[in-house]
Image (cartoon, grey):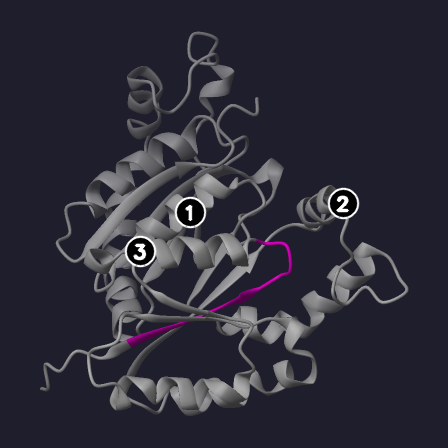
């Protein structure tokens, strides 16, 4: 088997207002060479730089979005051509809710690029439809709705630094079903089959981060069995992600409010996954503090 290291090419796309500029700046700070607003037709020639350059090129990131007009519709074709070449190609898609995007456009007093004579929401809807197939084929999806520019930059740093580039980056996220499914989740587990500590008056004020709540949740019949079997089921999935060059995965663990059962279970699963040598694990409690 060849041990030749493939050149890295990252395509950054997604919803207008979801943070592409922030991501581009963060990647530059990490040593990536970033090209903004490149027509898809130029992807092949710019990838040729890897073989034509006299000295090794840094990792290359290309920002492509609907500003490319008619050119943008040809992106799928050019991505398919690149995937046949000896390049470590990844597609990063930036997502955000309609409410978050509207707020951002209103704050800068700029129209949406697809708004035309309609409203900002009209432009967002048209863009979502145009980007649907790209989102579905993305290697990494990041929902920036609740992230400020510093948090988004840190997330990019966690996932795209040189020392992490060959490892699978796993985010274990707790959440509450009452607040909706995480839009960037690759896998979702439901902990509502366990008794809810909310109904225990001595545990209600605390969270799954507190030992008393964690012990209560994980000592319930079926809890340890679930954790053991779920971790075992994850192993072939994570191996498959690596084989398919997917380097970032979000495992979402939910309960009703995202305060007790999901938090305790997510912490336990993250701790066990961190023992694997070929992954880097972080944990996020999306809805902690909302109740």
| Residue 247 screen position, x and y as percent | 31, 64
Is residue 223 toward the left or the right of residue 23 in the image? Answer: left
In front: 137, or 120?
120
Magenta stretch: give its range: 8-18
| Labels 2 and 1: the sequence-earlier one | 2
SS at badge 3: loop
Q: Residue at x 33, y 18 (%)?
A: 210
Q: Which residue is mark 1?
A: 153
Q: Which residue is mark 2?
A: 106
What is the total number of numbered labels drawn onto the structure image? 3
Q: Residue at x 49, y 52 (%)?
A: 22
The answer to whether 173 is drawn above or below residue 70 in the figure is above
- How far apart are the alpha carbons under marks 3 and 1? 10 Å
Q: Which residue is mark 3?
A: 30
Q: Is residue 20 visible?
A: yes
Q: Residue furthest top?
A: 202
| Labels 3 and 1: the sequence-earlier one | 3
| Residue 135 screen position, x and y as percent | 55, 68
Pointer 3 with pointer 2, Cβ within 8 A:
no
């Amino acid at each position: 088997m060849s041990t030749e290291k493939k050149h890295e090419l990252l395509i950054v796309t997604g919803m207008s207002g979801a943070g592409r500029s922030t991501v581009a700046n963060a990647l530059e700070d990490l040593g990536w060479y970033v090209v903004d607003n490149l027509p898809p037709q130029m992807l092949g020639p710019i990838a040729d730089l890897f073989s034509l350059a006299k000295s090794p090129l840094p990792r290359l990131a290309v920002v492509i979005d609907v500003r490319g007009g008619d050119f943008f519709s040809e992106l799928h074709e050019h991505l398919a051509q690149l995937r046949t070449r000896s390049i470590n190609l990844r597609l990063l898609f930036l997502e955000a809710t309609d409410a978050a995007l509207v707020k951002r456009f209103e704050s800068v007093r700029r129209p949406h690029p697809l708004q035309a004579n309609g409203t900002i929401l009209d432009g967002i809807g048209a863009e979502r439809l145009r980007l649907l197939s790209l989102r579905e084929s993305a290697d990494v999806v990041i929902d920036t709705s609740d992230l400020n520019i510093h948090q988004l930059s840190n997330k990019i740093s966690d996932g795209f630094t040189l020392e992490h580039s060959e490892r699978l980056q796993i985010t274990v996220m707790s959440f509450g079903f009452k607040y909706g499914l995480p839009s960037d989740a690759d896998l979702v587990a439901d902990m509502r089959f366990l008794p809810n500590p909310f109904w225990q008056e001595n545990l209600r004020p605390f969270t799954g981060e507190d030992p008393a709540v964690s012990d209560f949740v994980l000592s319930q019949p079926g809890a340890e069995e679930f954790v053991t079997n779920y971790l075992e089921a994850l192993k072939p999935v994570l191996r498959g992600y690596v084989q398919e060059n997917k380097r970032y995965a979000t495992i979402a663990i939910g309960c009703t409010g995202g305060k007790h059962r999901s938090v305790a279970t997510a912490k336990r699963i993250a701790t066990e996954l961190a023992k694997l040598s070929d992954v880097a694990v972080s944990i996020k409690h999306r809805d902690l503090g909302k109740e």
